[in-house]
């Protein structure tokens, strides 16, 4: 229904990085849409200029040099990239960070996540704070059985009072340095914010202009994401305040009396005075999500929607199910793969590569006439999919020229020549074939994260509608929908400015949240209802103060729920689950949680208690605004504006061009066709049909399209596409495993890997999960092929973990499933998943004993065990095998059988997903083609490694060697002989130490994993990790050595300790980085889990990195205070042999394990031990520093404790990212 005709002007504005979009409803109901540059020397502020232009068009005199008269403006709604740009460009406020004493480096250490595990230099974003203040204070959670002096049984124990006197001096010192913004992170403030509130009051009294309390910004339990969010708020909010002051100054009376609302990152509007940095980073994109959710979901009869935003600077994938009140999945889906004006190029080894490098807005694509590189935009222009005559003349140095097709052709012609040079013996590719190839690769690259994100939530992309928006989304919509199996594409008539339009449709939101630590059970329902009622009242009062009547306000309660002893919490609404006699008054949250958990993870845990971490209420003030006006049918055929030649898979086709503004709801346009409006271009591909809805939006029915013939001969474009498809299979297997597993190790610590193998057991693709798994699984699969031969049948699933069968250590259980194809007697592929099980028996809980001497002491052993036989899960047999260690004196069977069985079923399910995806791929291309490209992908990796080896030999010589030692003196020796002509090498580990009487023996598969990991790191290209990496390499490992021990040798330490020493030796031989060190700068450390201990110190071990031109990374110091009688087990290295330096750099400091007895001496525990501890004892773990690189004193030497240089690209951080990564990332 159309909205009431406005009496004044209503503005919805999205200020983006390149363009500012303005959606305006004028008096009388006329809609005006405007797009202008966000930065232009002719005006100061783009949103103000947009408002001025609209007012001027309607006859209101508004000279640019005078403030605008706002008397005729009803409201302004805005989204802005001011916060985003300040974050990306590091132009925020100077910030000091205040933390609980002992945790000054907590945010720098972070989570140790390495998104790109093959990068030798781990990119770390520069800290947002420049000064750290530590304050004496500490609360600790009370635990049953705690015997520390002073425990009273309260929920929290005041362990160390807040010292405000000393803090005052520290704050005054920081103020004297000119720092006026403060972020406060006290460890347990989420549960009791009193200390933070006292700190905030003192800071404001002393003159700090902005104070961000972590408990107020985001009251969540996890300190690291809470701290990052508080820092971001302190860093960005002053910038936003300055921008808002400047914006208001552009209007008479500073917009007094005009409602000005800003879009928050969660998709809700908030008054200008409440807009803050922590809620502003995704302000603009959130408007687009609201826009497509409201317009598309409601019009598609409840069918779920995936949004695809491809603008001038970035592509994002969003998913949502909109119910008219809130986003069921919200922005937790997060950002898709960034493709800002993605550049295109052939890699050295022949793969077509799209992104992640960007041409940006300046110089932009080659067609912008500013000397930019070839991009996807240029490829679309060369193929006739973009028509320069329909673009504004804003390009070139003078910003007065049209798009230049000749410049794009020249750039793509150069790429065609490079492709030809990189693929000798192949027919030359035309410019159109190269451009089309890059488009197809770009589409597949964008589909891959969409598949991954939907799979992570347990959804099927083919059941969704694809809603495209952004200026470039319509050019790729049909191809992406077809690749994802979707049948319908929806493109709103305002898709080019949908973020602005979404702000016009959005509701005003107020949220309130409090932490909670209750079980969800009848005894707690009264307390939960009381908290929900109080938060609802807070939301209603806040919205009423903004002018909303009671009938315009709605509230919805959420509980942040998780199963006890798990860390995977879901924010659940009870909508659709009315209250029952055994639930809260707000609804049946237990049923809602079980339903959501089953959808996302495939199972529930009915015998496990559910814990409430947080209580949240979301209040919305509905504006009732609707800007839709129906179109009248024309009764005439659609008018063709012109006809152009456009290149598709079939070659050039005559393609009619239509203007969207001239089309009516009775028009149907078969592809190929191009539909153009003022802000975007829509490509209707052959086999698709576009029609207009009664509201003027474009709906495209996506046909299957003509299948392109793909042969077995190598084609560079198909090589890149198959590379993505093979990797996607391994990634989706990983999503299924994480989603369906029950144990913390797999679901939350992500200690697993999934892979696809060829019929010979050779690795085809392995998602980059755990490095030590990377090459070892290939050995496992090939062992099973040799051992079982013809005894492998469809319906069989194998289980193995023995070192002689390619195992790493016993807790890593590998599940292998052969893939059969009709008419082929033997497996055509294999899929496998390896996961670390928390316990499989042995002499100590956790199956990681520090003092094991034989394999049987480390747990259950499987060589070639049929976990599933003829389609039947062998539960009784596998249970018996898991309990078998208990028959050995001093050992126990598995201590967590049900988790073992659940995780094994999850691994079987992950493999089944892999089989399904392989079958789909074979069904699409044929078995011969898929296996041919399996070989081509492996050959491509082989070529990349050969090129690396040739380059190394040319620079450093054909023979290198290196040696390092374990702490017990066992040498790890390596000699590498490179053949520069063939690009091959022999890696000879002869001379390495004998098998040891302990558990630092490393199975042969571990050495191969270390080698394939190092080779992939040194290649320096984004190539698939597969068997081809090892093809140019011959590996010699002496039998009976520490690197290939006897079958019954203990190996648990070899997997985690010796593997790292092998990596150090390989990198030492090639001279790429020093020991225990990847990249330059201070090291990073981990946290602690929920054991009965107090983490009382966790910070960098300053000065432990070796001196050099580039200092080695510092280790960390972690102190654990024990609260109960326990047994401490330690398994570590580098306590006797220092991490080496390279090229004259000094070695890093040794690690140290100390036990500080409560009333006694300090004891050096050594590297490996198991010792009883008592309440009050403290374990001090000091990890070794990394070796330095280059002689100290050279130019460029970093000072002790210096922060590393800012990375070349932005690395995500904050609560949204951490929450999403924990639940979705693999």
Image: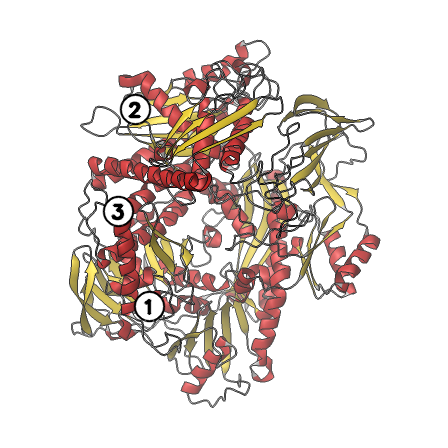
Left or right position of 805 against 698:
right
| Viewer-side label of 1, 3 | 3
Q: Where is residue 74 in the image (x, y as percent from the top left)?
A: 50, 79
> Gap in Å between the C-alphas at discs 1 and 3?
27 Å
Residue 787 vs 430, above or below: the answer is above
Q: Say if residue 545 shows up in the picture.
A: no
Q: Which mark is residue 423?
A: 3
Which of pointers 1 and 3 lies earlier in the amino acid sequence? 1
Left or right position of 495 against 228:
left
Q: Residue 795 carries which label?
A: 2
Q: Position of residue 1199 (x, y in %)?
A: 67, 50
| Viewer-side label of 2, 3 | 3
Helix, strand or loop status at disc 2: loop
Q: Position of residue 721 (x, y in %)?
A: 29, 46
Helix, strand or loop status at disc 1: helix
Model colouring: secondary structure
- Does the residue at mark 2 contact the one at mark 3 (Cβ under 8 Å)? no
Residue 447 vs 152, above or below: the answer is below
> Gap in Å between the C-alphas at discs 1 and 2?
55 Å
Which residue corresponds to mark 1? 367
Left or right position of 108 against 789:
right
Mark 3 crowdedness (10 Å alpha carbons): few <14, some 14-19, many ≥20: some
Q: Say if residue 539 shows up in the picture.
A: yes
């Amino acid at each position: 229904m159309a909205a009431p005709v406005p009496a004044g002007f209503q503005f919805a504005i999205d200020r983006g990085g390149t363009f500012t979009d303005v959606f305006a409803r004028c008096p009388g109901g006329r809609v005006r849409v405007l797009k202008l540059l966000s930065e232009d020397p002719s005006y100061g502020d783009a949103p103000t200029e947009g408002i001025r232009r609209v007012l001027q068009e309607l006859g209101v005199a508004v000279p640019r040099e005078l403030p605008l008269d706002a008397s005729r403006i009803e409201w302004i709604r805005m989204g802005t990239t001011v916060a985003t740009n300040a974050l990306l460009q590091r132009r925020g406020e100077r910030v000091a960070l205040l933390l609980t004493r002992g945790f000054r480096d907590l945010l720098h250490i972070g989570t140790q996540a390495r998104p790109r595990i093959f990068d030798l230099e781990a990119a770390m974003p520069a800290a947002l704070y420049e000064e750290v203040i530590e304050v004496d204070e500490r609360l600790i959670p009370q635990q049953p059985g705690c015997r520390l002096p002073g425990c009273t049984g309260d929920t929290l124990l005041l362990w160390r009072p807040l010292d405000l006197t000393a803090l005052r001096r520290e704050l005054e010192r920081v103020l004297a340095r000119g720092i006026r913004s403060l972020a406060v992170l006290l460890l347990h403030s989420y549960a009791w914010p009193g200390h933070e509130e006292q700190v905030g009051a003192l800071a404001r009294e002393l003159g700090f202009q902005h104070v961000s309390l972590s408990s107020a910004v985001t009251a969540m339990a996890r300190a690291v994401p809470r701290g990052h969010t508080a820092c971001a708020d302190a860093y960005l909010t002053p910038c936003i305040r300055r921008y808002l002051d400047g914006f208001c100054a552009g209007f008479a009376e500073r917009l007094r009396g005009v409602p000005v609302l800003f879009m928050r990152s969660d998709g809700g509007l908030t008054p200008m005075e409440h807009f803050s940095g922590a809620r502003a980073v995704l302000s603009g994109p959130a408007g687009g999500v609201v826009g497509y959710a409201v317009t598309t979901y409601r019009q598609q009869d409840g069918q779920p929607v995936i949004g695809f935003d491809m603008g001038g600077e970035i592509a994002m994938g969003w998913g949502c199910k909109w119910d008219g009140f809130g986003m069921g999945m919200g922005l937790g889906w997060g950002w898709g793969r960034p493709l800002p004006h993605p550049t295109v190029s052939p890699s050295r080894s022949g793969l077509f590569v799209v992104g992640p490098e960007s041409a940006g807005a300046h110089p932009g694509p080659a067609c912008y006439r500013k000397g930019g590189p070839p991009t996807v935009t240029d490829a679309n222009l060369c193929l006739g999919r973009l028509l320069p005559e329909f673009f504004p003349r804003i390009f070139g140095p003078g910003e007065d020229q049209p798009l230049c097709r000749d410049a794009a052709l020249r750039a793509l012609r150069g790429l065609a020549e490079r492709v030809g040079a990189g693929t000798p013996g192949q027919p030359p590719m035309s410019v159109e074939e190269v451009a089309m190839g890059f488009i197809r690769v770009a589409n597949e690259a964008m589909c891959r994260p969409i598949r991954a994100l939907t799979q992570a939530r347990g959804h099927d992309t083919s059941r969704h509608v694809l809603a495209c928006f952004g200026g470039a989304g319509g050019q790729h919509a049909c191809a992406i929908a077809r690749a994802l199996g979707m049948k319908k594409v929806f493109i709103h008539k305002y898709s080019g400015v949908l973020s602005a339009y979404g702000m016009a449709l959005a509701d005003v939101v107020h949220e309130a949240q409090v932490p909670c630590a209750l079980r969800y059970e009848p005894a707690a329902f009264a307390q939960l209802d009381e908290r929900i009622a109080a938060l609802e009242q807070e939301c209603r009062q806040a919205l009423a103060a903004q002018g909303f009547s009671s009938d315009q306000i709605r509230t919805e309660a959420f509980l942040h729920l998780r199963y006890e002893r798990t860390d995977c919490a879901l924010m659940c609404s009870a909508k659709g689950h009315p209250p029952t006699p055994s639930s809260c008054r707000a609804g049946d949250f237990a049923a809602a949680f079980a339903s959501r958990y089953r959808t996302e993870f495939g199972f529930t845990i009915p015998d496990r208690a559910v814990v409430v971490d947080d209580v949240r209420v979301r209040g919305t003030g509905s504006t009732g605004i609707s800007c839709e006006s129906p179109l009248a049918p024309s009764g005439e055929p659609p008018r063709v504006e012109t006809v152009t030649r456009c290149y598709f898979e079939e070659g050039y086709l005559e393609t009619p061009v239509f203007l969207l503004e001239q089309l009516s709801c009775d028009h149907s346009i078969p592809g190929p066709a191009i539909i153009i409006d003022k802000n975007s271009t829509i490509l209707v591909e052959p086999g698709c049909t576009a029609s207009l809805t009664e509201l003027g939006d474009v709906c495209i029915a996506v046909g299957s399209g003509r299948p392109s013939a793909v042969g077995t001969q190598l084609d560079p474009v198909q090589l890149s596409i198959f590379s993505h498809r093979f990797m996607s299979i391994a990634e989706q297997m990983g999503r299924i495993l994480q989603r369906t597993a029950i144990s913390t190790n797999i679901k939350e610590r992500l200690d697993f890997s999934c892979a696809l193998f060829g019929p010979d057991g050779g690795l085809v693709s392995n998602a980059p999960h755990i490095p030590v798994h990377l090459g070892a699984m290939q050995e496992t699969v090939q062992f099973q092929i040799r051992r079982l031969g013809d005894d492998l049948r469809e319906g069989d699933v194998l289980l193995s973990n023995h070192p002689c069968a390619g195992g790493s250590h016993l807790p890593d259980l590998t599940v292998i499933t052969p893939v059969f194809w009709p008419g082929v007697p033997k497996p055509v592929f294999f899929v496998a998943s390896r996961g670390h099980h928390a316990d499989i028996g042995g002499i100590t809980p956790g199956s990681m004993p520090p003092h094991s001497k034989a394999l049987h002491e480390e747990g259950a052993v499987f060589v070639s065990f049929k976990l599933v036989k003829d389609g039947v899960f062998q539960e009784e047999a596998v249970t018996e095998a898991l309990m078998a260690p208990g028959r050995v004196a001093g050992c126990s069977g598995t201590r967590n059988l049900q988790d073992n069985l659940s995780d094994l079923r999850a691994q079987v399910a992950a493999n089944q997903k892999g089989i399904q995806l392989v079958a789909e791929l074979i069904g699409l291309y044929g078995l011969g083609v898929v296996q041919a490209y399996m070989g081509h992908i492996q050959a491509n990796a082989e070529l990349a490694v050969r090129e690396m080896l040739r380059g190394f030999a040319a620079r450093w010589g054909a023979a290198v060697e290196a040696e390092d030692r374990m702490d017990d003196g066992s040498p790890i020796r390596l000699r590498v002989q490179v053949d520069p002509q063939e690009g091959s090498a022999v890696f000879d580990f002869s001379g390495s130490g004998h098998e040891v009487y302990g558990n630092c023996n490393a199975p042969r598969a571990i050495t191969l994993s270390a080698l394939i990991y190092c080779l992939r790191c040194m290649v320096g290209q984004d190539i698939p990790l597969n068997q081809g990496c090892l093809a140019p390499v011959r590996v010699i490992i002496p039998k009976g050595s520490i690197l290939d021990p006897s079958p019954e040798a203990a190996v648990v330490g070899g997997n985690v300790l010796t593997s790292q020493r092998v990596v150090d030796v390989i990198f030492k031989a090639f001279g790429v980085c020093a020991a225990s060190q990847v990249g330059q700068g201070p090291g990073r450390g981990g946290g602690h889990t929920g054991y009965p201990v107090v983490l009382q110190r966790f910070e960098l071990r300053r000065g432990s990195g070796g001196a050099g031109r580039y200092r080695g990374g510092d280790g960390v110091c972690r102190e654990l205070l024990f609260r109960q009688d326990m047994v401490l087990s330690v398994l570590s290295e580098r306590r006797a042999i220092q991490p080496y330096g390279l090229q004259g750099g000094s070695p890093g400091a040794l690690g140290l394990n100390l036990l500080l007895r409560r009333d006694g001496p300090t004891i050096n525990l050594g590297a490996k031990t198991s010792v009883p501890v008592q309440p009050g004892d403290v374990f001090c773990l000091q990890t070794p520093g990394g070796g330095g690189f280059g002689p100290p004193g050279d130019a460029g030497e970093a000072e002790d404790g210096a922060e590393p240089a800012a990375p070349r690209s932005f690395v995500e951080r904050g609560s949204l990212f951490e929450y999403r990564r924990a639940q979705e990332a693999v």
